[in-house]
Image: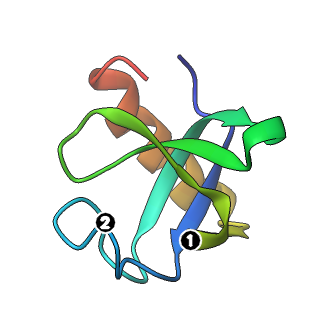
Amino acid sequence: MRILEFVICVDNSKYPASLEKWKIYPLVGKEEALGLIRVVDESGEDYLYPEELFAGIQLPSVAREKIRKEYHKKGY
């Protein structure tokens, strides 16, 4: 899977062990018909979560590329 964009967690109340509120996560898939997005969470694996838990975010190109490189090392 490849990183499509980045999102920030705005609500982790149902998943406190898996998501950190206000942390940036890579978005690696969407299930739009179900209202779910796939992000790489705190476990280091990608899982589906309700999209309302996140907001899209635009990162500066330098930051975006550095984060992409780190996740690329992990296979994303």
Other residues around mark 1 within 10 Å, as few (<14) / some (14–19) / many (≥20): some
Q: Position of residue 48 (x, y in %)?
A: 49, 41
Above or below, 33 against 18 in this view is above
- Which image quadrant is residue 47 in? top left
Q: Residue furthest right?
A: 33
- Which image quadrant is residue 32 in? top right
Q: Find out whether the residues at labels 1 and 2 contact each other: C-beta distance under 8 Å.
A: yes
- Residue drawn 66% across the image and 70% down it: 52
In which quadrant of the rendered image does the C terminus lie? Answer: top left
Q: Give the amino acid type for the residue marked by disc 2 in the picture.
A: Leu
The disc label shown at residue 53, or none? 1
Above or below, 58 against 12 in this view is above
State how far apart marks 1 and 2 are (Cα): 10 Å
The disc label shown at residue 7, or none? none
- 43 on left or right of 6: left
Other residues around mark 2 within 10 Å, as few (<14) / some (14–19) / many (≥20): many
Q: Position of residue 34 (x, y in %)?
A: 73, 41
- 71 on left or right of 3: left
- 65 on left or right of 57: left
Q: Decide which of 19, 63 is in the foreground and name it.
A: 19
Q: Position of residue 40 (x, y in %)?
A: 38, 42
Q: Secondary structure at mark 1?
A: helix
- Residue drawn 30% across the image and 74% down it: 20
- Residue drawn 70% across the image and 36% down it: 30
Q: Position of residue 49 (x, y in %)?
A: 50, 51
Q: Decide which of 61, 57 is in the foreground and name it.
A: 57
Q: Give the amino acid type for the residue marked by disc 1 in the picture.
A: Leu
Q: Decide which of 7, 37 is in the foreground and name it.
A: 37
Question: Label 2, on which residue?
Answer: 19
Q: Secondary structure at mark 2?
A: loop
